[in-house]
Amino acid sequence: MYLLPSRSRLSRLLAACSLGMALALPVAAQTLTIGVRAGPDSIDPHFTAAGTQAEALKHVFDTLTWSGNGLEVQPRLAESWRAVDASTWEFKLRRGVKFHDGSDFTAEDVKFSIERIPMVSGPNPTTIYVRRVKMVQVVDPYTVRVQTDGPAPTLPYDFIRLFIVSSKAAAGLTRDTANAAFNSGKAAVGTGPYKFVSWTPKDQLVLDRFDGYWGPKEPWARHVRKEIPNDAARVAQLKAGQLDLIVRVPAADVPSLKRDPKLTVETIETVYVFNIELDLRDNSPQITAKDGSKLAKNPLQDARVRQAINMAIDRNALAEVAMEGLGKPSYQMVTPSIFGFSKKVQPSKVDPAGAKRLLAEAGYPNGFKIVFSFTNDRLPGDRQVGTAVTQMLAGVGIDVQANAQPVAVFFPARTRGDYSMSMAGWGTLTGESHYTLSSVAHSNDKDRKMGAFNVIGYKNPVMDKLLQDAAVEMNEDKRRSLLEQANELLVQDGSRIPVVAIASAWAMQKDKVKITPRVDEDTMAMNIRPAR
């Protein structure tokens, strides 16, 4: 038989329950749950260079140098660095840093991490961050010297994406075994402010605060990153209070979310630019005459055709209508804050009639048929911009088949060379134009380790020379001039057509969190703080 407690006993029980609730509340309050559009493809930080991968794994794995909120290079695991000679950089490492398993971080882990990248990097290679490295020498436990294949002025910038893994935890892993070991947590041992707990692909990543972290203590005991690619679902879960913050708010929802008294919205112009790349190979796979028959040659190899495509695109309409104000017309691959941006590049005019004349002069008075592939779940407005470009090109006689693809499908297909015309966002994440131009505008040259993302067959000896010279030029003014010329030449050649620079918006629970937005769009717990 159940007996009711006496009044005094009841009072004690209620007091105990209240105390228990009071003790439990701070723990709940210390959990940060955010909704992201896309998450990592692996927990191995060296597997892919995708931005969403790096964004998530910066919580677990530290880098040698760090990119500040404005992309300024800052110390991280390396406290300082200097050029010893023309082809040697010395990095002094931070002492007292612990891995999540309690072991010490040393120079051996840096050497191991650099040397492992070429062995495990996947289809979107992280090798671009260590391509200049020829040899790594451990001078002592807290000093490494990196010998490069010639002068490498941008090496400290490249190392903002040099994730340091534990040489002990990741020892012996191969390309075939590494993902499984990291994804299970066995090898996911870093020095970052958060420890790996669990990962369910395409669902959520769970991290716990690492109280042995060398830097400032994080306010969040647990950080949960929920992958919600559907924009409407992400917004709905925020409104329902199921999420503390969401990324990449659809432009159409920004006004209503701003009016919601429970929410706050923050926006910023980012370094990401949507650019259309035109395949210049002789046998482009997705371009035909309008009746489907094979053309005598690839029309995109004709500069007049590329110029016609450029003239058909109304960038103002893309920024204001397709992106609903969360965009800005762009005419070069990098944004104005990036080192090497050229002020000489002038906005191109929208001229559909002129575009038709150029197509006729090139021998295509009735246009041609082409498949246009673009991402639909990566950056704000990608699907809308791709769809609008399709309609603009139809207006000058080019029969375009829109092929919107999720990131997981798009990038592997692009790397294989499956596309004739495609569009994705590219961000100059190091703050220096050479990062972008040497990856997409230099001819694909494995010996020089440049052009890894140039899959369209673009090759201009003048461009190659400019980028090769910029890669070894230690004088900052001379290097800036070389990169400005390279940006101008890329616009002139027209193999890539930048169209819109991307702005981004975050929405959050006003009474719980506040964020310091970054121009590279990285949304990290380290930039999110309690509202009070």
Image (cartoon, rainbow, N blue to C red):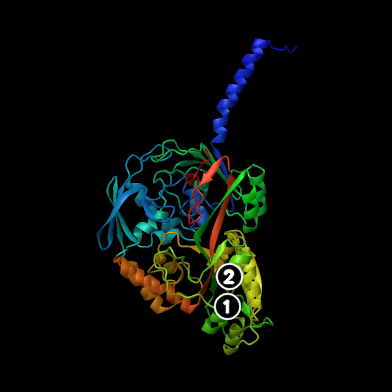
- Above or below residue 230? Residue 491 is below
> Is 156 above or below relative to 79?
below
Few, some or many residues within 10 Å of mark 2 (<14, 14–19, 20+) = some
At numbered mark 2, what does the secondary structure look like: helix, strand or loop?
Answer: helix
Spot the residue most to the right: 1
Q: Residues within 10 Å of mark 1 (few under 14, many from 20)?
A: some
SS at mark 1?
A: loop
In the rendered structure, which amino acid carries the disc numbered 2? Asn
Dot placed on the residue nearer the N-terminal end, 1 or 2 = 2
Q: Which mark is residue 350?
A: 1
* 181 and 280: which is toward the camera: 280
Classify the position of the N terminus by image quarter.
Answer: top right
Q: Quadrant of residue 430?
A: bottom left
Relative to 33, does residue 349 appear above or below in the rendering?
Answer: below
Q: Position of residue 298 (x, y in %)?
A: 56, 82
Q: Is residue 417 above or below residue 57?
A: below
Query: Image check: 257 left or right of 475?
Result: right
Whether residue 410 is visible, yes or no, is yes
In the foreground, 193 or 298: 193
Q: Which residue is mark 2?
A: 316
Question: Residue 126, how many percent across, how many down?
Answer: 45, 58
**For this view, does 449 lie left or right of residue 221?**
left
Question: Mark 1 belongs to which amino acid?
Answer: Val
Q: Nearer the viewer, residue 453 or 502?
A: 502
- Residue 157 image-quadrant placement: bottom left
